[in-house]
Image: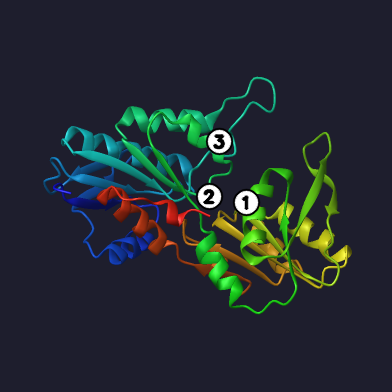
Amino acid sequence: MGRPLKLFGGSSNPRLNEAIAKSLGVPMGEATLKRFADSEVSFQITENVRGADVFVVQPTSPPVNEHLVEMLVMIDAFKRASAGRITAVLPYYGYARQDRKDRPRVPITAKLVADLLSTAGTNRVITMDLHVGQIQGFFDIPVDHLFSAPVMLDHISSMNLGPIVIVSPDAGGVERARAYAKRLKVSLAVMDKRRGGNLEIEMIHVIGDVAGKTALIVDDMCDSAGTLVRAVDALLEAGASRALAVCTHPVLSPPAIDRILESPIERLIVSDTIPLRPDAVACEKIHVLSVAGLLGQAIQSVHEETSVSSLFV
């Protein structure tokens, strides 16, 4: 293409920004990002981006609101600097769990975030492992929904885990888990969660045969790890020989690490879509795989107007 590729990143995950730039073989764009004393975001592009194909990398990791507003401010700056096209690269899409009205008088915040990105000036979105794929329909602009599965599956295949059963932690994650089971050519099990009046999980049933097998739980994120550790306990009680988990986005809000350390789960495999909290870095049960190469390939394909379907599972 005639217009140059320009890669910029926010403050959410600097290490991922640099890894994507390295995979693309391009330098990070020149800009100044700082905050006023009251925490207002101040952003200035310090190079020419007129007519450029701009990609802005910013997962909305904790603190979610701060990083989301930072992303919107950056996109507005590129729009006003006459960038040719602005692509928001959100490896982790915050507010994705609020995708429907599951209770009276609640917002659909995943749709609100989509509207905010479009209004700010976003022309295209690249994201990874949305909580539910239907969120793509909240946008009136193109969305490339990537999956970490290719990276995760390569690692799992090298682990020699023996007989495996892929486990979805709930009915909503069956499609994601089925993709893993299909690629690994193994069986699938599903966890049936029953919640009480306070929305706490009261009971978990295992649907499927897990006896004598390595149970591999597949989910899009791990937040407080409450569901994860309850699922591990249920799987071991059902006869699984061991339990591991794959979660793309390691939110790991307290007391997640304490729960994981106290749980019989052997390993939690996560990606670097968002940076690990300090206590998670020291947790020997957590293993991080990089998706910078996948994101770099997607950015290159979008820039060159070539197909990204090979990156989908």
* Mark drawn on residue 198: none
3D distance between C-alphas at marks 3 and 2: 11 Å
Q: Which residue is mark 3?
A: 134
User: Nearer the N terminus, badge 1 or badge 3?
Assistant: 3
First-in-chain label (3 vs 2): 2
- Residue on which the image places disc 2: 129
Which of the 4 quarters of the picture holds residue 25?
bottom left
Q: Residue at x 62, y 51 (%)?
A: 176
Residue plotted at (21% across, 52% down):
5
Residue at the image point whose x is 19% and y is 32% from the top: 80
Q: Which mark lies nearer to you, 2 or 1? A: 1
Mark 2 belongs to which amino acid?
Asp
Query: Between residues 14 and 150, which one lies in front from this camera angle?
Result: 150
Question: Mark 2–mark 1 contact, CB under 8 Å?
Answer: yes
Query: Which residue bears the numbered disc 1?
Result: 176
Check the image and report above or below for 211 versus 192.
below
Q: Earlier in the sequence, mark 2 or mark 1?
A: 2
Q: Secondary structure at mark 1?
A: helix
For mark 1, does the 10 Å Cα neighbourhood hold few (<14), some (14 to 19), or many (20 or more) residues? many
Amino acid type assigned to the residue bearing label 3 in the image: Gln
Q: Is residue 91 left or right of residue 19?
A: right
| Residue 50 locus on image (x, y percent) | 13, 40
Relative vertical location of residue 146 with respect to residue 172 in this rendering, above or below: below
Question: Of helix, strand and loop, which one carries label 2?
Answer: loop
Do the residues under discs 3 and 2 have CB atoms within 8 angstroms? no
| Most foreground residue, 306 or 294 | 306
